[in-house]
Each structure stands twice: as structure tokens, then as C-alpha cells.
Image (cartoon, rainbow, N blue to C red):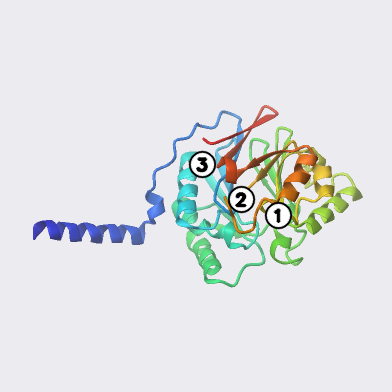
Amino acid sequence: MLPALIAFLLAVAVALVHVFVPLTSLLPAYTMAAREEGELRVHFLDVGQGDCTLVEFPSGEVLVIDAGDGSFINRSHTVRYLKALAPRKTIMLLTHADADHYGGFEPLLKAFGADTFYLPALGEDTPEYEALLAAVRKSGCKADEMTRYDVIADGSGAYLACLFPRSMEEGEGNETSLVLYLSYEGVGVMLAGDISAAVERRLVGENALMPGIFDSGEYRVRLEETDILKLSHHGSAYSSCEEWLKLLSPAKAVVSAGRGNEFSHPSPEALARAAAAGAEIYRTDELGDIVLHIKKGGYRLSYGT
């Protein structure tokens, strides 16, 4: 009788812990090499057919850009990964309201909290998206929106500038996805969200109007100085057009896509266009997590750690 009672009490205790402390919060951190002094790291996480990018600034602050689809394996991965980075401060940013981008934010908010959460102006009328908004409110973090000329700056000199959209009223769905440019020590990283070729061509046209059209005060943005490009929309055939790739001329291109996904991302057409523009391709569906290391004006990519 006593062993049965003990087992029952343990089961109740576990259930209560799960109610008040999310199970993913109890997961151990990954073992990971520490960031070097003065180094900025960008972690392109393997979250299947979704997106999650962690910008680890030299100050120790971490910016979480999208968070995957929220499936148990993916949210466990992002929680354990972020625990390993041990951020001094966490900022979260949702590029647009697609479930494969926002589904994993709720457990991250519960486990880490956030100083600021950047939400898109256009949400999604689903219980899942409402749950995210409720989690943001409950966390007590500052909620804000991001449009062109908004900047997240780090004391190290690194900054993330928004190029698109220009206002919160234009477009819908993927066509309002944030386009972000990260700069540190002369290395440029373009994070193009899920935009289509139409938006890419629009940005190319605007860039041709005048030099520095995307600059925000002291924060300089030059599309032609892009070294690393995260291909738009998981490498969709309807993104990564020739004009965009020719202007950016990236040396490296990263693709976030799931193994054997139903959309056949990344498309052979997009990969061929990126390769023709001179980019070496790195894919999460083939390599797993991919890490960009920037230090002293140089960079390298690693994977499989």
C-alpha cells in the first residue's frame, strides 16, 4: 500500500510541476563552446520547416528572430540552445504571423522572458496566435512594432536595421515580412524573412534611387555589401530572384528548411540562382544548426556542433 501511495504522490507532484513550470523549462542546456571576446554569432537553428535565428551580440544580449513551429522537438531544441547561450538580456522579434515562425515563442517567453517583443502589425485570427499575444502580455515585456528605419543597436557597434515594410499598412501575409540587415565590423548579413520576388524587386528598385536610402541616421545599410544572405521564404522558387541576388552578391547563402518538407523547399531554381550569383549554399535540412562567427572584420560558418 505504501509504495502505491508514494507513486501516486510523485505523480501528483510531477503534474503540479508541469502546471506551474513548463516541462521545456526543466530541460538541460546544450554543451556549447563559449562565444569569444568581441565575437558576434548568428545561430540559424534547425527547426524543421520553419525559422528560428538567434543573434548573439558581443555584449551577451541575444535577439531571437522567429521561433519555429512550436512542435515538442523544436521547442525543446530552442529552449536548450538558448539556455546554452545564457543571454544577459533577451529580445524577441516575429517577422510575420505564420505559425512556422511564431509557434515556438510561448515556451521561450515562459523560460526566459523578454525585454522587448517586436510583433507584426498584421496578426492571425487563430487560437494559437491569440495564445502568443496572451503570453506576451502575461510576460510583462514591452511590446512594439518594427518598420523601416527602426534599429536594434548593441553597445559593441553591431546593429540590426529594418528595411521593410515601410509602414504597417502595406501588403499582407508574407509580403509584410520584415527584412532585416545585420552589420558588425564591416560584415553584412541579410535576413529576408518570407518575402517574394515582388518585394525583392521593389527593394532593388528603391536602392537604385539613391545611395543610402535605407540608412537610419548613423546606422549605414548597403545592400551591395551583403556577405551572408538568408534566402527568402525557405528557398522558395518564387523568391531569390536574379535582380536581388545580383545586387546583394552574397558569398554565402543559408537556407532554413525541413527535411523532406511538403513544399519541396529549397527549390532547385532558387538554389541555382543563388549559386549562379556566386553564393556557397548552407542548408539546415542537410547540416543541422548553422553558426556564423564574426570577429575582427572576418567571418566563418560552422555546423554540426
Label 1 crowd (10 A; few <14 / some 14-19 / many >=20): many
Tag on residue 274?
A: none
Q: Residue at x 44, y 36 (%)?
A: 31
Residue type at mark 2? Ala
Discs 2/3, front: 2
Horizontally, residue 300 falls left or right of residue 108, namely right
Discs 1/3, front: 1
Q: Nearer the viewer, residue 238 or 84?
A: 238
Label 3 crowd (10 A; few <14 / some 14-19 / many >=20): few
Quadrant of the image containing the N terminus: bottom left
Residue beneath disc 1 = 236
Residue beneath disc 2 = 257
Horizontally, residue 25 falls left or right of residue 102, namely left
What separation in Å lies between label 2 and label 3 (alpha carbons)?
29 Å
Residue type at mark 3? Arg
Residue 32: percent from the left, percent from the top?
A: 48, 34
Residue type at mark 1? Ser
Q: Is residue 295 visible?
A: yes
